[in-house]
Image (spheres, rainbow, N blue to C red):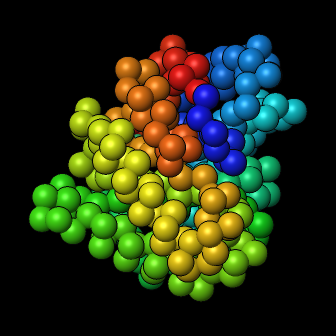
Amino acid sequence: MKASPRTPRISGNWKMNLDGRSANELVCAIRQWMEENRNKSLEVGLFPPAVYLAQVVELSKGSPIHVGAQNAYFEKSGAFTGEISLAMIRDVGATGVLIGHSERRHVFGESEEWITKKLNAALALELEATLCVGEKLEERESGRAASVIERQIRSALSQLQPESLSRVTIAYEPVWAIGTGKTASPKQADEAHQQIRQLLAKLYSPALAEKICIQYGGSVTPENAAALLAEPQVDGFLVGGASLDFAKFRKILEAV
Ligand code: PGA
Protein backbone atom coordinates (compact mmCIF):
# COMPACT_ATOMS: atom_id res chain seq x y z
CA MET A 1 0.00 0.00 0.00
CA LYS A 2 1.32 3.47 -0.81
CA ALA A 3 2.11 5.84 2.03
CA SER A 4 -0.26 8.77 1.74
CA PRO A 5 -1.75 11.14 4.31
CA ARG A 6 -5.00 11.05 2.31
CA THR A 7 -7.80 8.48 2.54
CA PRO A 8 -8.63 7.14 -0.93
CA ARG A 9 -11.99 8.35 -2.17
CA ILE A 10 -13.95 6.67 -4.94
CA SER A 11 -17.01 8.55 -6.20
CA GLY A 12 -19.68 7.58 -8.68
CA ASN A 13 -21.05 10.28 -10.97
CA TRP A 14 -24.25 8.80 -12.33
CA LYS A 15 -24.87 11.69 -14.74
CA MET A 16 -28.36 11.47 -16.36
CA ASN A 17 -28.67 7.71 -15.91
CA LEU A 18 -30.62 5.10 -13.91
CA ASP A 19 -34.19 5.26 -12.61
CA GLY A 20 -35.55 5.18 -9.08
CA ARG A 21 -35.50 1.43 -8.80
CA SER A 22 -32.05 0.83 -10.27
CA ALA A 23 -30.68 3.68 -8.13
CA ASN A 24 -32.06 1.92 -5.02
CA GLU A 25 -30.55 -1.41 -6.01
CA LEU A 26 -27.17 0.15 -6.69
CA VAL A 27 -27.03 2.04 -3.38
CA CYS A 28 -28.08 -1.04 -1.42
CA ALA A 29 -25.40 -3.15 -3.10
CA ILE A 30 -22.70 -0.54 -2.44
CA ARG A 31 -23.85 -0.14 1.15
CA GLN A 32 -23.69 -3.86 1.75
CA TRP A 33 -20.22 -4.06 0.21
CA MET A 34 -19.06 -1.23 2.50
CA GLU A 35 -20.47 -2.99 5.55
CA GLU A 36 -18.62 -6.17 4.59
CA ASN A 37 -15.39 -4.21 4.03
CA ARG A 38 -15.60 -1.94 7.05
CA ASN A 39 -11.91 -2.42 7.81
CA LYS A 40 -10.85 -0.81 4.50
CA SER A 41 -9.64 2.76 4.67
CA LEU A 42 -11.80 4.15 1.90
CA GLU A 43 -14.40 6.86 1.30
CA VAL A 44 -17.23 6.42 -1.17
CA GLY A 45 -19.22 9.25 -2.73
CA LEU A 46 -22.33 9.08 -4.91
CA PHE A 47 -23.66 11.81 -7.18
CA PRO A 48 -27.13 10.76 -8.34
CA PRO A 49 -29.45 12.84 -10.53
CA ALA A 50 -31.10 15.56 -8.42
CA VAL A 51 -34.55 13.94 -8.41
CA TYR A 52 -33.09 10.85 -6.72
CA LEU A 53 -30.93 12.72 -4.20
CA ALA A 54 -33.38 12.42 -1.30
CA GLN A 55 -33.89 8.69 -1.75
CA VAL A 56 -30.16 8.00 -2.08
CA VAL A 57 -29.56 10.04 1.10
CA GLU A 58 -32.25 8.03 2.88
CA LEU A 59 -30.81 4.68 1.75
CA SER A 60 -27.29 5.74 2.72
CA LYS A 61 -28.20 6.91 6.24
CA GLY A 62 -25.98 5.43 8.90
CA SER A 63 -23.47 4.26 6.30
CA PRO A 64 -20.18 5.97 5.41
CA ILE A 65 -21.45 6.83 1.89
CA HIS A 66 -21.25 10.55 1.08
CA VAL A 67 -24.06 11.77 -1.17
CA GLY A 68 -23.86 14.87 -3.32
CA ALA A 69 -25.54 16.64 -6.22
CA GLN A 70 -24.11 16.85 -9.71
CA ASN A 71 -24.77 20.57 -10.02
CA ALA A 72 -26.57 23.49 -8.42
CA TYR A 73 -27.11 27.20 -9.02
CA PHE A 74 -25.28 29.73 -6.90
CA GLU A 75 -28.19 32.07 -6.09
CA LYS A 76 -30.06 31.42 -2.84
CA SER A 77 -33.58 31.34 -4.33
CA GLY A 78 -35.72 33.10 -6.88
CA ALA A 79 -36.94 33.02 -10.44
CA PHE A 80 -34.48 30.48 -11.87
CA THR A 81 -36.75 27.93 -13.52
CA GLY A 82 -35.24 24.48 -13.70
CA GLU A 83 -32.43 25.12 -11.24
CA ILE A 84 -31.87 23.79 -7.72
CA SER A 85 -30.12 25.69 -4.96
CA LEU A 86 -27.27 24.58 -2.75
CA ALA A 87 -29.52 25.07 0.28
CA MET A 88 -31.99 22.57 -1.24
CA ILE A 89 -29.20 20.04 -1.58
CA ARG A 90 -28.42 20.47 2.10
CA ASP A 91 -32.08 20.40 2.99
CA VAL A 92 -32.51 16.88 1.61
CA GLY A 93 -29.50 15.75 3.63
CA ALA A 94 -26.86 15.60 0.91
CA THR A 95 -23.42 16.84 1.92
CA GLY A 96 -21.61 17.53 -1.32
CA VAL A 97 -21.79 18.88 -4.84
CA LEU A 98 -19.80 18.58 -8.07
CA ILE A 99 -18.66 21.93 -9.38
CA GLY A 100 -17.51 22.60 -12.93
CA HIS A 101 -17.81 19.11 -14.36
CA SER A 102 -16.59 19.14 -17.96
CA GLU A 103 -20.10 18.44 -19.24
CA ARG A 104 -21.32 21.55 -17.37
CA ARG A 105 -18.43 23.55 -18.82
CA HIS A 106 -18.49 22.27 -22.39
CA VAL A 107 -22.01 20.95 -23.07
CA PHE A 108 -23.90 23.59 -21.07
CA GLY A 109 -21.41 26.43 -21.49
CA GLU A 110 -20.80 27.21 -17.81
CA SER A 111 -18.26 29.98 -17.45
CA GLU A 112 -15.34 30.06 -15.07
CA GLU A 113 -17.05 32.99 -13.36
CA TRP A 114 -20.07 30.81 -12.60
CA ILE A 115 -17.88 27.99 -11.37
CA THR A 116 -16.14 30.35 -8.92
CA LYS A 117 -19.52 31.58 -7.67
CA LYS A 118 -20.85 28.05 -7.29
CA LEU A 119 -17.79 26.90 -5.41
CA ASN A 120 -17.93 29.83 -2.98
CA ALA A 121 -21.68 29.44 -2.46
CA ALA A 122 -21.30 25.69 -1.76
CA LEU A 123 -18.51 26.24 0.75
CA ALA A 124 -20.42 29.06 2.45
CA LEU A 125 -23.14 26.47 3.19
CA GLU A 126 -20.55 24.03 4.56
CA LEU A 127 -21.02 21.60 1.69
CA GLU A 128 -18.11 19.52 0.43
CA ALA A 129 -17.23 20.60 -3.10
CA THR A 130 -15.61 18.46 -5.77
CA LEU A 131 -14.07 20.86 -8.26
CA CYS A 132 -13.56 19.26 -11.68
CA VAL A 133 -10.80 20.51 -13.95
CA GLY A 134 -9.17 19.19 -17.09
CA GLU A 135 -7.97 20.04 -20.55
CA LYS A 136 -9.47 19.26 -23.95
CA LEU A 137 -7.65 17.09 -26.48
CA GLU A 138 -6.44 20.01 -28.61
CA GLU A 139 -5.14 21.73 -25.48
CA ARG A 140 -3.11 18.66 -24.53
CA GLU A 141 -1.85 18.13 -28.05
CA SER A 142 -0.68 21.72 -28.32
CA GLY A 143 1.19 21.50 -25.00
CA ARG A 144 -1.28 23.70 -23.11
CA ALA A 145 -2.68 21.13 -20.65
CA ALA A 146 -0.74 22.49 -17.68
CA SER A 147 -1.68 26.11 -18.31
CA VAL A 148 -5.38 25.25 -18.79
CA ILE A 149 -5.48 23.31 -15.50
CA GLU A 150 -3.68 26.13 -13.71
CA ARG A 151 -6.08 28.74 -15.09
CA GLN A 152 -9.14 26.69 -14.09
CA ILE A 153 -7.87 26.19 -10.54
CA ARG A 154 -6.67 29.75 -9.99
CA SER A 155 -9.98 31.07 -11.24
CA ALA A 156 -12.19 28.71 -9.20
CA LEU A 157 -10.21 29.23 -5.99
CA SER A 158 -9.64 32.96 -6.48
CA GLN A 159 -11.86 33.98 -3.55
CA LEU A 160 -11.44 30.89 -1.41
CA GLN A 161 -10.40 31.25 2.22
CA PRO A 162 -7.65 28.85 3.36
CA GLU A 163 -9.92 27.45 6.08
CA SER A 164 -12.40 26.25 3.42
CA LEU A 165 -9.83 24.36 1.39
CA SER A 166 -10.19 21.22 3.49
CA ARG A 167 -13.75 20.86 2.14
CA VAL A 168 -12.57 20.89 -1.47
CA THR A 169 -11.71 17.77 -3.45
CA ILE A 170 -10.17 18.27 -6.88
CA ALA A 171 -11.10 15.90 -9.69
CA TYR A 172 -8.65 15.97 -12.59
CA GLU A 173 -10.69 14.85 -15.57
CA PRO A 174 -9.09 15.33 -18.98
CA VAL A 175 -12.00 16.02 -21.31
CA TRP A 176 -10.58 13.68 -23.96
CA ALA A 177 -10.77 10.77 -21.52
CA ILE A 178 -14.35 11.24 -20.31
CA GLY A 179 -16.70 8.62 -21.68
CA THR A 180 -14.34 7.90 -24.57
CA GLY A 181 -12.67 4.70 -23.39
CA LYS A 182 -9.33 6.55 -23.55
CA THR A 183 -7.70 6.89 -20.17
CA ALA A 184 -4.82 9.09 -19.14
CA SER A 185 -1.80 6.86 -18.51
CA PRO A 186 -0.90 6.50 -14.84
CA LYS A 187 2.11 8.75 -15.52
CA GLN A 188 0.02 11.44 -17.23
CA ALA A 189 -2.47 11.41 -14.35
CA ASP A 190 0.26 11.54 -11.73
CA GLU A 191 1.99 14.45 -13.47
CA ALA A 192 -1.22 16.47 -13.65
CA HIS A 193 -2.02 15.71 -9.99
CA GLN A 194 1.48 16.70 -8.95
CA GLN A 195 1.13 19.96 -10.83
CA ILE A 196 -2.20 20.63 -9.09
CA ARG A 197 -0.74 19.88 -5.66
CA GLN A 198 2.24 22.14 -6.30
CA LEU A 199 -0.10 24.93 -7.33
CA LEU A 200 -2.17 24.46 -4.15
CA ALA A 201 1.05 24.55 -2.13
CA LYS A 202 1.96 27.84 -3.77
CA LEU A 203 -1.53 29.35 -3.35
CA TYR A 204 -2.00 28.13 0.26
CA SER A 205 0.71 26.09 1.93
CA PRO A 206 2.50 22.79 1.37
CA ALA A 207 0.86 21.40 4.52
CA LEU A 208 -2.66 22.22 3.33
CA ALA A 209 -1.92 20.98 -0.19
CA GLU A 210 -0.73 17.62 1.16
CA LYS A 211 -4.15 17.01 2.69
CA ILE A 212 -6.25 17.67 -0.40
CA CYS A 213 -7.76 14.65 -2.13
CA ILE A 214 -7.09 14.75 -5.88
CA GLN A 215 -9.20 12.26 -7.80
CA TYR A 216 -8.69 11.16 -11.38
CA GLY A 217 -11.67 10.81 -13.71
CA GLY A 218 -12.03 9.71 -17.33
CA SER A 219 -12.86 6.15 -18.41
CA VAL A 220 -11.82 4.56 -15.12
CA THR A 221 -12.53 0.83 -15.30
CA PRO A 222 -11.81 -2.26 -13.19
CA GLU A 223 -8.95 -2.93 -15.61
CA ASN A 224 -7.07 0.36 -15.19
CA ALA A 225 -7.99 1.32 -11.61
CA ALA A 226 -5.17 -0.41 -9.75
CA ALA A 227 -2.37 0.99 -11.93
CA LEU A 228 -3.74 4.54 -11.68
CA LEU A 229 -4.21 4.28 -7.92
CA ALA A 230 -0.67 3.03 -7.47
CA GLU A 231 0.61 6.49 -8.45
CA PRO A 232 1.58 8.55 -5.41
CA GLN A 233 -0.53 11.58 -6.32
CA VAL A 234 -3.71 9.73 -7.38
CA ASP A 235 -5.99 9.72 -4.33
CA GLY A 236 -9.08 8.15 -5.84
CA PHE A 237 -11.51 8.38 -8.73
CA LEU A 238 -14.56 10.14 -10.02
CA VAL A 239 -16.13 7.34 -12.03
CA GLY A 240 -18.86 7.84 -14.63
CA GLY A 241 -19.90 4.90 -16.80
CA ALA A 242 -18.38 2.15 -14.65
CA SER A 243 -20.15 3.48 -11.52
CA LEU A 244 -23.56 2.51 -12.94
CA ASP A 245 -22.82 -1.20 -12.85
CA PHE A 246 -22.26 -2.60 -9.36
CA ALA A 247 -20.02 -5.43 -10.58
CA LYS A 248 -17.66 -2.91 -12.18
CA PHE A 249 -17.85 -0.36 -9.38
CA ARG A 250 -17.14 -3.05 -6.80
CA LYS A 251 -14.00 -4.09 -8.65
CA ILE A 252 -12.84 -0.46 -8.65
CA LEU A 253 -13.49 -0.27 -4.89
CA GLU A 254 -11.56 -3.51 -4.49
CA ALA A 255 -8.59 -1.97 -6.31
CA VAL A 256 -8.03 0.31 -3.30
P1 PGA B 1 -16.43 8.29 -17.36
O1 PGA B 1 -16.90 9.70 -16.72
O2 PGA B 1 -15.88 7.47 -16.24
O3 PGA B 1 -17.67 7.71 -17.96
O4 PGA B 1 -15.38 8.61 -18.38
C1 PGA B 1 -16.16 10.33 -15.72
C2 PGA B 1 -16.80 11.64 -15.35
O5 PGA B 1 -17.30 12.34 -16.22
O6 PGA B 1 -16.83 12.01 -14.16
Residue 220 quadrant: top left
Place of residue 115 in the rendered image (x, y in percent of width and height, measured from the top left): 48, 73
Residue 43 quadrant: top right
Place of residue 202 in the rendered image (x, y in percent of width and height, measured from the top left): 53, 78
**Looking at the rendering, in which quadrant would you find the C terminus?**
top right
Place of residue 155 in the rendered image (x, y in percent of width and height, measured from the top left): 45, 80
Residue nearest the observer in this picture, 42 or 180: 42
Q: Quadrant of ligand 1?
A: top left
Which residue corresponds to the image point at 47% horizontal and 19% vertical from the top-left?
248
Does residue 68 appear to the left or right of 221 in the view shown? right
Looking at the image, residue 219 lies above or below residue 53: above
**Looking at the rendering, in which quadrant would you find the N terminus?**
top right
Residue nearest the observer in this picture, 167 or 47: 167
Q: Which residue appears farthest toward the bottom when viewing the image?
A: 159
Which residue corresponds to the image point at 43% horizontal and 21% vertical from the top-left?
222
How many dots with numbers? 0
Which residue corresponds to the image point at 49% horizontal and 29% vertical from the top-left?
243
Residue 135 makes an appearance in the image = yes
Residue 86 makes an appearance in the image = no
Place of residue 65 in the rendered image (x, y in percent of width and height, measured from the top left): 73, 36
Which residue corresponds to the image point at 26% horizontal and 32% vertical from the top-left?
181
Q: Which residue appears farthest toward the front when viewing the image?
A: 3
Residue 246 quadrant: top right
Residue nearest the observer in this picture, 24 or 247: 247
Looking at the image, residue 79 lies above or below residue 20: below
Looking at the image, residue 159 lies above or below residue 149: below
Does residue 29 appear to the left or right of 113 in the view shown? right
